[in-house]
Amino acid sequence: MSGVNYDAKVFGNRLKKLRKTFGKTQQDIADLLFVSVDSISGYETGKTMIGHDYILTLCEHFNISADYFYFGIEKPIAEEQWTDKIVSLLNGRKESEKQKAYEILRLVFQ
C-alpha cells in the first residue's frame, strides 16, 4: 500500500462514523482515551492528529483493525468476545433477570 498518506480529515470521518455506529458520544470516547471532548472534536474534524496509542485503544475497544482508520478496511482484530458482550448486557440488571438469562443460555447450550 505504498503511496497511501495519512489524511487527518478522512481519519476523523471514520472515527465519527465508528463512534455513531456504536451509539457512543464524544464524551464516551473522551472518557475512554482520558482526553477532553474538545480533543475528540479535533480528531473528528481533522484539525488535530491523534496519537498512535489512542488508535490502539480505539481498535481494542471496538474490536477492529487499524486498517479501518488508515485504509477504510473493516475487519475485526479477533474473534468476537461473546462473554464480554453478555456481561455488558447483564451489568446493572436485577439478580432475577440475570438468573433468567442464565437459564435461557443453559437451555440453548445443553
Image: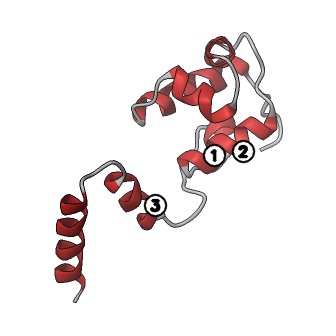
Q: Which percent across, then down, holds residue 48?
A: 75, 14
Element class at badge 3? helix
In the image, residue 7 above or below residue 91: above
Which residue is denoted by mark 3 in the rendering?
84
Q: Which residue is at 32% across, 56% downward?
A: 90
- Contact, CB < 8 Å: mark 3 with mark 2? no
Look at the image and tell me in which quarter the N terminus lies: top right
In the shown orientation, is residue 81 left or right of residue 23? right
- How crowded pointer 1 is (Cα within 10 Å; few <14, some 14-19, many 20+) is rated as some
Depth order, front residue of 85/74: 85
Of the residues shown, which amino acid type is indicated by label 2?
A: Leu
Of the residues shown, which amino acid type is indicated by label 1?
A: Cys
Q: Which percent across, then down, holds residue 56?
A: 72, 45
Disc 3 or disc 1, which is closer to the eye? Answer: 3
Which residue is denoted by mark 1 in the rendering?
59
Depth order, front residue of 36/76: 36
In the image, residue 75 above or below residue 80: above
Which residue is denoted by mark 2 in the rendering?
56
Disc 3 or disc 2, which is closer to the eye? Answer: 3
Of the residues shown, which amino acid type is indicated by label 3?
A: Asp
Give the number of the disc on residue 36: none
In the image, residue 51 above or below residue 93: above
